[in-house]
Image (cartoon, rainbow, N blue to C red):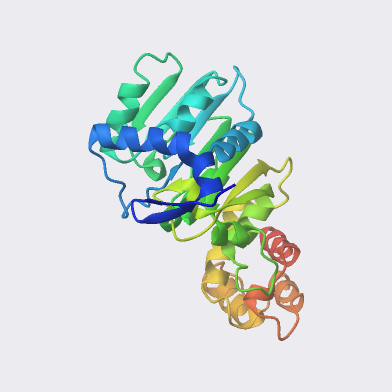
Amino acid sequence: MEKYMYLIHGKIFKNSVFHILMELLKETLRILRSYGVKPSRRLSQNFVVDKHLLETIISYASPSISDDVLDVGAGLGTLTARLAEKAGKVIAVEIDKRLVKVLRDRFKHYGNVEVIHGDFLNLDVKASIIVGNIPYHISTPILFKILNMRFKRAVLTLQKEVAERLIAKPGSKDYGRLTVSTNIRANIEIIDTYPPESFYPPPEVFHSLVLLTPKDKIEVNLELLDNLLIKLFSQRNRIAKTVLRKTLINDFGLDKGMESFKAIVESIPENKRVYQLTIDEIISICNRLKQ
């Protein structure tokens, strides 16, 4: 087979990739042109044009007629339309009013699609399944919001580096508050990783598809955990004992003479830094604080 290179809007595509993407890419470009919409860099708009990625999202989301599915950042409705074929209801949330117009036109005759114009972070919405192509610049607050919702599973497209933070090991540069909070609340599976050409316009980085499944039992007070994690990881490179002593006194009202104070501080090795604390050690600190 002859090898060709295609130039589309300043991006070069190899022959094999081009033909896989062409169908959805054409559809995406047609919709954008017909509405006079230019993707917003400020909103990190990169629309999925990879059929395999869409099919994988649907497969792992596995919606049924009894499910309400929340599509975070529904964009042009490419995924929304496929979800609507299987789900009882799809709630399509979109912050860009230009794309809300597209969605409302596209789904005006669908009885099971609700389009909401708004910022997901400021909305109170409920669904059993959550999907979304999550913008990098707000991925952390969106993940924290999702983790505090009640759901069966979430299938999310994240920048690869964000996905790597979810599964990072203690002591690594990627390990932090998001790692601990997510692992305590949910089981994490990195399903696959996709190149920039899977999106239009192509971003500069790879993306990973992630499955989050809530854990059946969480053996820690989550409000206490979240407060502790904020205090600890704001000083992630400092000696853990030093940070803990100040945090326990200033933020949790403990006294140096209290048994719980002594037990918590003495349980941590002398030279261990905050970013080296294991999830089990952090859970233990929380549970001792609650006593």
Please state if 204 lies on the left or on the right of 276 as rendered.
left
Please state if 170 lies on the left or on the right of 55 as rendered.
right
- On the image, which quarter does residue 172 sit in? bottom right
- In percent of width and height, residue 10 lies at 35, 56
Q: Which residue is farthest left?
A: 36
Visible in this render: residue 268? yes
- On the image, which quarter does residue 128 sit in? top right
Looking at the image, residue 78 lies above or below residue 14:
above
Residue at image location 53% in from the left, 30% down from the top: 127
Looking at the image, residue 50 lies above or below residue 144:
above
Residue at image location 53% in from the left, 69% down from the top: 231
Visible in this render: residue 150? no
- In percent of width and height, residue 52 lies at 59, 38
- In percent of width and height, residue 117 lies at 32, 34
Q: Which residue is farthest front?
A: 2
Looking at the image, residue 241 lies above or below residue 221:
below
- In percent of width and height, residue 42 lies at 31, 55
- The total of numbered circles placed on residues is 0
- Who is closer to the viewer here, 32 or 238? 32
- Who is closer to the viewer here, 251 or 54? 54
Please state if 120 lies on the left or on the right of 98 as rendered.
right
Q: Which residue is farthest bottom?
A: 271
The quarter of the rendered structure image containing the C terminus is bottom right
Please state if 221 lies on the left or on the right of 157 as rendered.
right
Residue at image location 57% in from the left, 53% down from the top: 223
Residue at image location 40% in from the left, 55% down from the top: 11
